[in-house]
Image (cartoon, helix red, strand yellow):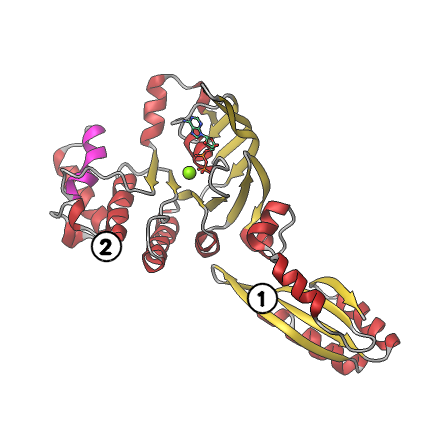
Amino acid sequence: MIEIKNLKKIYKSEAGDVTALDDINLSIRKGEVYGIIGLSGAGKSTLIRCMNLLERPTEGSVYVDGQDITRLTQKELRALRGSLGMIFQHFNLLMQRTVEDNVAFPLEISKTPKDEIKKRVSELLELVGLTEKAKSYPAQLSGGQKQRVAIARALANHPKLLLCDEATSALDPMTTKSILGLLKDINRKLGLTIVLITHQMSVIKEICDTVTIIDNARIAESGPVLEVLSNPKSQAAKNLFGHSQEEDSEIQRISLSQNGVLLRIKFIGEATVRPVISNMVMQFRVNANILFGNIDHVQEAVFGELLLELSGNPETVEEALKYLYQQNLTIEELRRS
Ligand SMILES: Nc1ncnc2c1ncn2[C@@H]1O[C@H](COP(=O)(O)OP(=O)(O)O)[C@@H](O)[C@H]1O
Ligand SMILES: [Mg+2]
């Protein structure tokens, strides 16, 4: 659906050049929810704005459905923009227009006949759950309702792609959840591809299939959300999803038994780890002491980790370890006594 190749963006200003994006390569599949996360100033907004050429790349190409959009004529570009919807952190609604007139706006621009506009607007308001608010003005709505109007407006012309720039960053956690639920619902119902950028981890966990971490203008790491969260590899991903320094120093303070080995076991799916540990204890007669357990969710999937101390006869501990390493788990040996 989207393929970005060797993208570079340099902003020229009087204070000097700012490299906002450097050597960005990524590929977004049709129908997925693709999340881009990073700290403020990392280059996220610039990246998403390069996907509809609100920003022009300094170098590189942006392919949408196989077409390099950096080479389009002005007219072709206008047509392309019509097929891409976008929503923003601060909603950008027209305050002088009612809810239904906000949603109708892009349809008026695309010269849709009046009766069709009427029909489409009522469909869209129903989709986002705002039928009752059709005649209200934005000032009369809550933040979540305003974002729903913005979503309806973005979907008006049946876009093939929805771009979301920090769409939930101005909302409280409950409202964030309901907007994310709506986006996921639209993604499933309409098969719409969604790209969203965020600095909120919860957004990535709740609705994204793929995540890219952008750090200081570059991609630090990219992959299926479950993989990146459960096993971050780059320093930037570890900072976002990994253990804090405090947690690491806590681990150094744990006092181990004689012949003790401290392990960190990561697992995906709760059922994967329990039988392994109980089998190991029965088979090798080692002591297995769970010191800490943590479970997290990515959409419907469960993943987590355990801190496990094995102790007992040194030989059987070694055998038990060997057994553990043969299982389909990610195991890290942290310390030995
Ligand atoms: N129009 C601009 N002119 C100059 N510098 C800009 C402009 N827009 C963004 N930048 C700079 O580019 C970098 C990336 O910005 P941005 O893409 O907005 O990051 P993010 O969305 O991750 O916070 C920042 O250093 C920012 O100051
Ligand atoms: Mg931004």
* Position of residue 175 measured from the top left corner of the image (x, y, whole percent): 31, 57
The residue drawn where x is 52% and y is 32% is 3
Which quadrant of the render holds ligand 1?
top left
User: Under tag 1, what secondary structure?
Assistant: loop
Q: Which mark is residue 5?
A: none
| Magenta span main SS | helix
> For disc 2, does the CB lie below 8 Å from ligand 2?
no
User: Under tag 2, what secondary structure?
Assistant: loop
Q: Which image quadrant for residue 335?
A: bottom right
* Position of residue 314 measured from the top left corner of the image (x, y, whole percent): 87, 75
The residue drawn where x is 28% and y is 42% is 91
Side of 98 where 333 appears, left or right: right
Q: Which residue is mark 1?
A: 269
Q: Which residue is mark 2?
A: 129
Q: Mark 1, residues whose alpha carbon is within 10 Å: few (<14), some, or many (≥20)?
A: few
The residue drawn where x is 81% and y is 71% is 337
Q: Amino acid at mark 1?
A: Gly
* Position of residue 42 measured from the top left corner of the image (x, y, whole percent): 50, 37
- Which badge, 2 or 1, is on the more N-terminal residue? 2
Q: Which residues are magenta?
A: 99-109
Q: Mark 2, residues whose alpha carbon is within 10 Å: few (<14), some, or many (≥20)?
A: some
Measured in 3D between alpha carbons, the distance from the residue under mark 2 to the one under mark 1, in whole angstroms, is 34 Å
In the image, residue 36 lies in the stretch drawn in magenta: no
- Is residue 264 something one can see in this rendering? no
> For disc 1, does the CB lie below 8 Å from ligand 1?
no
169 vs 267: above or below: above
Camera-side residue of 180 and 192: 180
Residue lying farthest to the right in this orientation: 315
The residue drawn where x is 21% and y is 28% is 109
Q: Which image quadrant for residue 154?
A: top left
